[in-house]
Image (tube, coloured by chain):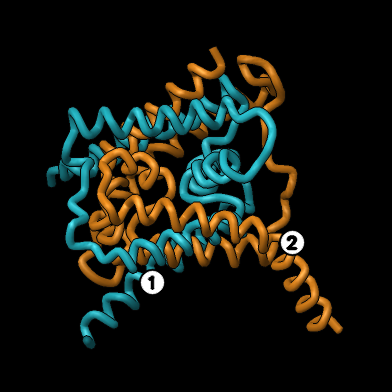
Amino acid sequence: MAIPHDWWMALLGGGLIGLAAAGLMFFNGRIAGISGIWSGLWFERGDQSGRFSFIGGLLAGGVILRLVYTPAVPDLSQVSWWQMGLAGLLVGMGTRLGSGCTSGHGVCGLARFSVRSLAATLTFMATGFLTVFLIGRAAAWL
Amino acid sequence: MARFSAFFMGLVFAIGLGLSGMTLPSKVIGFLDVTGDWDPALAFVMGGALMVNALAWRLTQPRGRAWFGGDLSLPRNKQVDARLLIGAALFGIGWGVGGICPGPALTSLVFLSPGMVIFVITMTVGMFVGNLLRPAVTAAVDLVGQTISG
């Protein structure tokens, strides 16, 4: 059986994410946790140069994707603004109360065998699965 | 040089997110749809990232210091507490509703679709609220714990 193309792309992209997270820890001594970096940029004091540079890199990466790899650019014209607004609110509150997101817990914490990150990752995976299941059920009813 | 390093790592991180499919909400929701038409592709994103990062940690940890100076900045808290689980649960719900998490959302900001701009704005507001609520949630959880244990 041939392995689907998007599985290879996921593995390749994941490898780059791991490399970037490893590089940020090795060279800068920082955890590549995006929610923590973004929140810190707005709501913490002190030296912001590392956070500012990393977010600058993320945005520059977005520009490169837009120019040379348009399959990464989603068509969100049909997506409800209410849905995205609610999702953002939950993601923002949840990542601060839970001290991290997919990157900080899922990629960085698990690589250091952090028990907190394992607990967090299992929890957000479980509620993510459950939420998509329930939304699917609700949509089937309506 | 430290600034350039942080910029470069952010850039590679974003390219990785884009190539892997993490910037596509429909693909993320397909991955989270385990009981429906499950698309397992995105499991390989975390798999690939963890393989590389876990190997690299075996190199970084013994050094104990960052290449450009300073200690490795690591969390001191080792306890799994209720606030961590409540937060992670809320985050998972939001991830399921929107199909997008913070890294891909910020990467996608430059695509300028209104839905994603709204997501980033409300996410930032949510972070402000979450930061404010941290002590209160910890205190509330402690109180409930004490009441239950009598």
Query: The disc labelled 2 sits on which kind of residue?
Result: Pro
Which image quadrant for residue B106? Answer: top left
Q: Subunit of mark 2?
A: B
Classify residue B2 by image quadrant: top right
A73, above or below A133, in the image: above
- Colour cyan belongs to chain: A
- Spot occupied by residue A126 in the image (x, y as percentages of width and height): 45, 66
Crowding at label 2, few (<14), some or many (≥20) Cα neighbours within 10 Å? few
Residue occupying the point 23% across, 38% down: A8
Q: Residue at x 63, y 53 (%)?
A: A116
Q: CA distance from mark 2 to mark 1?
A: 27 Å
Q: Disc 2, disc 1: CB below 8 Å?
A: no
Q: Is residue B40 visible?
A: no
**Residue carrying label 1:** A131
Chain shaded orange: B
The correct choice, above or below, for A136 with respect to B98 in the image is: below
Between circles 2 and 1, the one closer to the viewer is: 2
Question: Could you say which disc has been placed on residue B135 in the image?
Answer: 2
